Image (cartoon, rainbow, N blue to C red):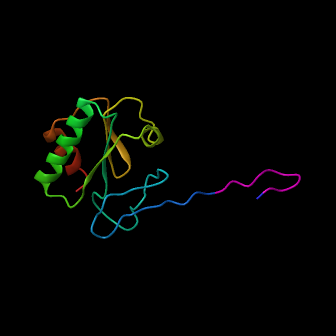
Amino acid sequence: MMVLFGRKKEEKKALACACSAAYSACETVEIASDCCAQTQEGIYCIKVLGSGCASCHAQYENAKKAVEKLKLPVEVEYITDLQQVLKYGVMRMPALVVNEKVLSIGKVLKSADVEALLRKFT
């Protein structure tokens, strides 16, 4: 809404979140630090941000292995869309995001290292 002799009011964008009680993958239109923290505890979303290169794909596979080993009820998302990656402020890839927090940037973590990071959330 525009006022004649004033500033334009800022519009607040709402989050579009597909999380459910079954810990489905969290998909947000706009990044928020506590997307679903009010409704869920533990790990509710894991993302690997990458460009599609071999290193990024290796990080994705290692994250999936860690989730399987810990028997977590969550899917790992692999995001290669540059616009979505930039919303996290990530300039080097691969990056690991857990519960909308960037935990690792620019290096491929082994599955054991990913497990150690995920254990902090459980």
Query: Would you place residue 96 above or below residue 31 in this image?
Result: above
In this rendering, position of residue 13 left or right of residue 40:
right
Q: Which residues are magenta?
A: 2-11
Q: Residue at x 22, y 49 (%)?
A: 118
Picture quarter with the N terminus:
bottom right
* Residue 10 magenta: yes
Q: Residue furthest bottom?
A: 21
Residue closer to the observer: 98 or 119: 98
Q: Position of residue 25 (x, y in %)?
A: 31, 58
Query: Would you place residue 96 above or below residue 67 in this image?
Result: above
Q: Residue at x 37, y 46 (%)?
A: 101
Q: Position of residue 44 (x, y in %)?
A: 30, 59
Question: Looking at the image, how many numbered discs can be counted on the residues?
Answer: 0
Q: Residue furthest left?
A: 69
Task: Decide whether the magenta segment is chiefly helix, strand or loop.
Answer: loop
Q: Residue at x 84, y 52 (%)?
A: 6
Q: Position of residue 26 (x, y in %)?
A: 36, 57
Residue closer to the observer: 69 or 61: 61
Q: Position of residue 62 (x, y in %)?
A: 17, 41
Query: Would you place residue 121 above or below residue 17 in this image?
Result: above
